[in-house]
Amino acid sequence: MGTPLPTTSEPASPVVKRWPAIGRAVARARRDLAAVLSGWDLTALTDPATLVLSELMTNSVRHGRVPGREIETRYERVADGLRLEVHDANPVWPLMGKPAEGDEAGRGLLIVDTLTRGQWGVADRTGVGKRVWASITADQDEETA
């Protein structure tokens, strides 16, 4: 059984931010998400959510960067936890790889898939590019711990 989420009379508004497509922005976005989760009384989701965000943003910085364009994050509190999205201007969708045992890269989406129990995906977005989304719930946190 998952950790019960606090009930509120009104859902929190989604939090949308834009970040430069550079490595330093990933750490800043993780800290920002941790603060948002704290404000929503969802600190139990901080570790898996910030790791998922880190993997998705890192993919956008490395593979989705378009000169002159920023990366957008969107965090939304949902009934059973958190939905987060990372938007970038590159229309090429990421593929989950199958890295060889000695490979030092290529495991990001495998980590996302594990932490979300397959509750993630890619979609077109209004304008150019794509959005990669993931759902993190309290029961997922307990199962992956």
Image (spheres, helix red, strand yellow):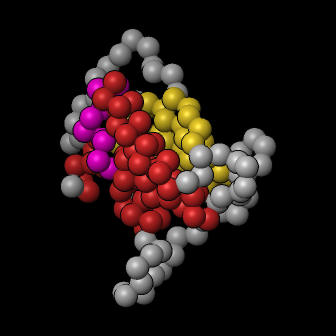
User: Which residue lies most toward the right here?
Assistant: 127
Q: Tell me residue 92's x, y (percent).
A: 70, 63
Query: Is 89 drawn above or below residue 111 in the view shown?
Result: above
The quadrant of the picture occupied by the C terminus is bottom left
Q: Residue at point 54% right, 61% down?
A: 59
Q: Tell me residue 48's x, y (percent).
A: 32, 50
Query: Is 119 drawn above or below residue 77 in the view shown?
Result: below
The quadrant of the picture occupied by the N terminus is top left
Compare residues 115 and 29 and report the one nearer the observer: 29
Query: Is 78 drawn above or below residue 135 in the view shown?
Result: above
Compare residues 86 and 25 and report the one nearer the observer: 25
Task: Locate residue 35 relative to residue 74 in the image: left or right.
Answer: left
Q: Residue at point 35% right, 25% down?
A: 40
Q: Tell me residue 131's x, y (percent).
A: 63, 49
- Give the main secondary structure of the magenta stretch: helix
Q: Residue at point 44% right, 30% down?
A: 77
Q: Locate residue 103: give its quadrant.
A: bottom left
Residue 136 among those drawn in magenta? no
Task: Locate residue 14 relative to residue 32 in the image: left or right.
Answer: right
Q: Residue at point 71% right, 56% down?
A: 66
How many numbered discs, if any? 0
* Residue 120 seen in this snapshot: no
Compare residues 38 and 112 and report the one nearer the observer: 38
Q: Provide the residue span drawn in magenta.
A: 40-48
User: Which residue lies most toward the top here?
Assistant: 9
